[in-house]
Amino acid sequence: MALPSRRRPRTARRRARVAHHLAGRVTPPAPDLRGRAHSRALPGPYGIAAHADDMAAVVGEPARAPVVPTGHSMGAFTATLTAARHPDLPSALLLPARPP
């Protein structure tokens, strides 16, 4: 499971390289978070808590396979809160350069 941070071209290129290396081994969804990018027009509530619940809904509870929420920056906060609000969902967290 991949949790998006802000949409930046450089970030998208990095994610494309990672997805290429993981192809066939994992399925990394990267949905537009409510209120951001192409999902700006979706109704609220907005915020990290809503993003965390949306991510759990994307994966499904119970999860169909091991889930490792991954995120950087805002995505790291979302991954952490997803794990806190849905403790049976993740098998681990991957948080590169998580802000304090």
Image (cartoon, rainbow, N blue to C red):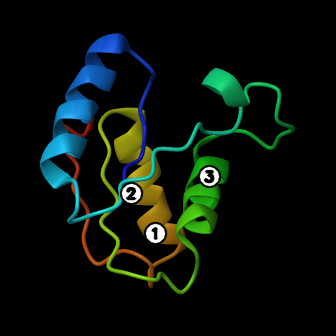
Farthest front residue? 24
Residue 96 vs residue 74: left or right?
left
Q: How many residues crowd mark 3 within 10 Å: few (<14), some (14–19), many (20+)?
A: some
Q: Amino acid at mark 3?
A: Ala
Q: Residue at x 30, y 52 (%)?
A: 70
- CA distance for labels 3 and 1: 10 Å
Spot occupied by residue 27 in the image (x, y as percentages of width and height): 35, 60
Residue where numbered disc 2 is placed: 80
- x and y percent of residue 4 in the render? 43, 38
Q: Quadrant of residue 65?
A: bottom left
Q: Which residue is mark 3?
A: 49
Given contact means CB atoms under 8 Å apart, are the residues at marks 1 and 2 in contact?
yes
**Label of residue 84 in the image:** 1
Amino acid type, residue under disc 1 in the picture: Ala
To which quarter of the image does residue 58 belong?
A: bottom right
The CA span between labels 2 and 3 is: 10 Å
The quarter of the image holding the C terminus is: top left
